[in-house]
Amino acid sequence: MKILVLNSGSSSIKFQMLDMSSEEVLLRGLVERIGLEESAISWKTDGDQHKKTLQIPGHKEGLSAVLDILTDSEHGVISDFNEIDAVGHRYVHGGEEYKDSAVVTAEDIPALEKLNHLAPLHNPHNLVGVKAMLELIPQVPNVIVFDTSFHSRMPEKAYMYALPYELYEQYGIRRYGFHGTSHHYVALEAAAMLGRPFEEIKVITCHMGNGTSFSAVQNGHSVDTSLGFSTMCGIPMGTRAGDFDPGILTHLLNTGDFTPESLHDLIYKKSGMLGVSGISSDMRDIEQKAWNEKDKRAQLALDLVHYNAKKFIGGYLAVMNGADALVFTAGIGENGWETREEICSGMEFLGIKIDKEKNKVRGKRVDISAPESRIKVLVIPTNEELMIAKETLELTQEK
Ligand code: ADP
């Protein structure tokens, strides 16, 4: 079975062709600068990197270029489109309508369009990718895998805010959660590492990249997660504030110095590690300044990330009455051993103790727990594309 995985953004499309018999990536690449000058497609097979600049006015042309590369006589990995068994699309928001990944046809387009307002920066572009594939290779089934669906079975008390109930009914204001594909993948892999059934274990998954979210996973699904209605809350991120008193927003609006748009920019693009440090949103830059130059604001940015991460882990341990594993993933979680060490320090009381030497690894799947740690602490590199391909395979094989 060969599955094409697509992640359609505003001006780019990431793609991967996987052979699911071996879970091997046959070809991966990126279409960039869609609709702009010097648009290009780059791709990699067996370590060989290639790039071609060409006119790509829209997503349909971009995906057509992807199909051309896949079937190219020199660089391609298939001889015919019919060798693609299914296409899996990363899709950010499934709202309350899509609780699971779904096979999508032209009939679903109106329902998907209705979700655009929930993730206006992502869903419309994801949808354009779906529409283009339905037109370009209509004979191949398409599956959409939502970032929200792993969280769709959270209990009401975890997803509702203590706001007037009418806001939920009228505007769909509730916690949805994001990064679900990543949380799902690493939680499944954690179960495999523990050698226990996924449905029987409790896991806290810490996805720490430019965007960060932690999830409490129990009974095979997420029971709580740190991102909410939007992707701005929870633990401080590269440029996003994380949790803060919403009274600050109304206070700032009342000063007359801010508009709703400038406040959005402030908490989405200018806060987090960037806002606190005044240096960068990138963890490596912050660590370098904090440790090598003893920069106080860079250190404060790190402290805010570590401290709030601890609070979420403690909260999820309380909610689930313990956990079998704590998993770190994504750019910071996989590579930042110093971050892992800081977050896990002083949590012996809760049953978390890492082996500091084992922890000193970057980007590798490894159990970093000390022998006496009641909770296994694991580093598991995420693989959202593989998870999307697995879901796609499962749904299309059933058909
Ligand atoms: P995205 O959310 O955009 O997919 P990533 O998962 O790639 O982001 O994570 C990006 C973050 O990972 C950045 O803050 C980067 O500094 C951090 N990161 C990458 N490598 C390391 C490293 N060796 N040590 C610490 N942080 C790292």
Image (spheres, rainbow, N blue to C red):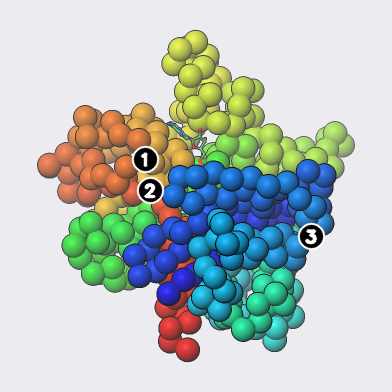
Residue farthest along the top direction in this orientation: 293
Q: Quadrant of residue 115?
A: bottom right
Amino acid at circle 2: Pro
The answer to whether mark 1 and mark 2 are in CB contact below 8 A is yes
Q: Residue at x 20, y 65 (%)?
A: 196
The answer to whether mark 3 and mark 1 are in CB contact below 8 A is no
Q: Is residue 249 above or below residue 184?
A: above
Amino acid at circle 3: Gly
The crowd level at tag 1 (other Cα within 10 Å; few <14, some 14-19, many 20+) is some
Q: State yes or no: Cβ of the residue under disc 3 lies below 8 Å from any atom of ligand 1.
A: no
What secondary structure is found at the residue carrying circle 2?
loop
219 left or right of 227 in image: left
Tell me which label, 3 or 1, sits earlier in the chain: 3
Residue farthest along the left direction in this orientation: 371
Q: Could you tell me how far apart the alpha carbons at marks 1 and 2 are, in whole angstroms? A: 6 Å
Q: Quadrant of residue 265?
A: top right
Checking the image for residue 142, the label placed there is: none
Label 2 sits on residue? 381
Label 3 sits on residue? 58
Amino acid at circle 1: Gly
Label 1 sits on residue? 363
